[in-house]
Amino acid sequence: MARVVSPRKACAVNPLKMSQTMGAALAFLGVDRCLPLLHGAQGCTAFGLVLFVRHFREAIPLQTTAMSEVTTILGGVDNLEQAIVNIVDRAHPQIIGICSTGLTETQGEDGEGALRTIRARHPELAPVALVFVSTPDYEGAFQDGWRLAVTRMIEELAEPAVRRHPRRINILPGSHITPGDIEELREMVEAFGFRPQVLPDLSGSLDGHVPEAFCPTTLGGAGVATIRAAGTAAFTLAIGEQMRMPAEALERKAGVPYHVLTRLTGLGATDALMQILSARSKRPVPAKYRRQRSQLVDAMLDGHFFFSGLQVAVAAEPDLLFALGAWLAEMGAQITAAVTTADSPVLADVPADEVLIGDLADLEARAAHCDLLVTHSHGRQMAARMRRPLWRVGLPVASGLAAFRPAGGGTPRVGRVPRHASSHKRGGQPAGRPRGCARSRCGRSQRTRARPERGMCRADRGGESVKVAFATEDLQRVDAHFGWATNIAIYEVTADSRAFVHTLQFGKGEEDGREDKLGPRLAAIAGCTIVYVAAIGGSAAARVIALKVHPVKVPEPQPIVAILDKLQGVLQGAPPPWLRRALRPREQRDFEDLKPHV
């Protein structure tokens, strides 16, 4: 059993979790013709909107009551009333999901009481379902908001049934289940003859389809009628420990029995799902899934050569952390660092010695000897500093277009992890077949690297490189003014190697202030990242910077070798932002480099 640790930190250095307000909003986005309404300031909604758009690459309908300083003090009921009336008048939704924020919760506003007052004043709102969920963003985490929103929808809308349909089942997916996963789960359930009702159903609203016309609300997903009919199902299948509360709420209200599957990732978890569906339907497992299971077993056997001994650091919401950790352990990997956002009963079953409730800074401190980092896209700066591969999972995943596509029975995932880890662990060789390597204390293999020879290309040496220029008179030290240096020596440098490229020689320049002598020297440093000089004039420095070369003044003559040693130390550690940008070619940048404008 893992030991769950809750450190006492004054603040999150590099936040991992997202607010439960965002989790509740995403749950409402899985309901057809719904418009989530965040009861708080505009900034709260803008942040969530940018986050969802970057992840799903879709237009996200999200509204706000636009609380200001005055309304926060005097009360925001008028803002809430005006927002609901305007939304109904313009967007014509079937349901409005109202999520509170830290602003309104701190003010102490009674959201449910406010809704009763608003309905009494506006009888025209009777056809519209209004669901309020209390989600202060100063407590809980993303999956908590999702859980609370689904529970409130069931409590408000689900109705007891006189009779149940034996072939109808409810599926309550957790926030870690993607639209692609929901589509595949629906196909599995239908293969056993069932008619699934999914709540929330992101596969209908955020699956990447292109609507024929603009719709101001969600388009697709679980309809209000489907939620009302949840009590007619024979049983409920809840995916993730977070969905136990909604399943219990439905059982209390409509008497529908439920079964909780804490995870679906992995061979054992998939077998458990198939056994439940087969037992409930009294049908054998279809031949299609028997063959897919055989393919998955074969892929897992092949993958053990790569996974065995792989040291992984994982940071995710509790249910996702448990699912990924258990699956990685099945494959032979070791979870040496595990960080999550909130407490949960499943954390004790995570295959790690310790699970820390913390942030990405905590993961970075514990992942020094890991081969692979697993978290969402907000961990990319950490991965760059640590020079470790990052497998992006969860939300948000802001790079690529397949973050929410179907997993194809789980087999492709077996091959996805080695592709990420091979850039760091054992030079891409299978873990069970080391070749010419020596074991280190952290379990990784390290190759002996020869000093690069002159003329070797960047790809031959491995790693990102920078070209560095030195203004020198004696070819040994940086001891010359840029404008009249007789020699400019060029080196190519990586974190663990360096190579002399060439030296360009110039005649003695006159110290008359004329800058025509700069032309050849500027041409010599073109393509470099840094130029070290003993001195440089202001106008000359401007022309150097225009070439995207960073001039560095050395206060007194220093050996070139000593400067190279210091530069390599910086590259091996945490380079400054301007140097990190220079290390990364423009064509390798992705959507994550674009700063959202809120």
Image: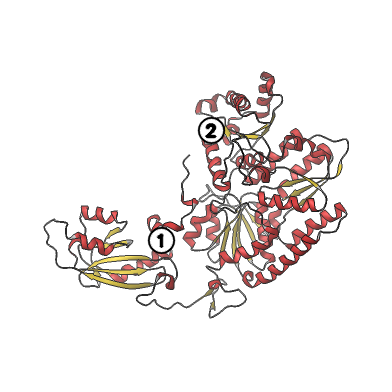
Look at the numbered discs 1 and 2 and tell me whether their residues touch, using CB distance below 8 Å: no
Q: Which image quadrant is residue 62 in?
A: top right
Residue 322 placed where, x, y %? 68, 56
Please, what is the three-letter code of the amino acid marked with disc 2? Ala
Q: Nearer the viewer, residue 423 or 194?
A: 194
Residue 443 placed where, x, y %? 57, 72
Name the secondary structure under disc 2.
loop
- Distance Cα–Cα, label 1 vs label 2: 39 Å
Please, what is the three-letter code of the amino acid marked with disc 1? Leu
- Residue beneath disc 2: 41
Vertical arrangement, residue 100 with respect to residue 593, above or below: above
Vertical arrangement, residue 110 with respect to residue 248, above or below: above
Mark 1 burial class by Cα count in 10 Å: few <14, some 14-19, many 20+: some
Tell me what residue is drawn at x 82 percent, y 57 percent: 275
> Is residue 352 something that shows in the picture?
no
Mark 2 burial class by Cα count in 10 Å: few <14, some 14-19, many 20+: many
Give the left or right position of residue 234, taking residue 25 as reference: right
Q: Which image quadrant is residue 161 in?
A: top right
Residue 442 placed where, x, y %? 56, 71
Q: Nearer the viewer, residue 543 or 376?
A: 543
Residue 392 placed where, x, y %? 57, 56
In the image, farthest residue toward the front: 212
> Is residue 386 something that shows in the picture?
yes
Q: Nearer the viewer, residue 186 or 238?
A: 186
Query: What is the image's colouring?
Result: secondary structure
- Residue beneath disc 1: 583
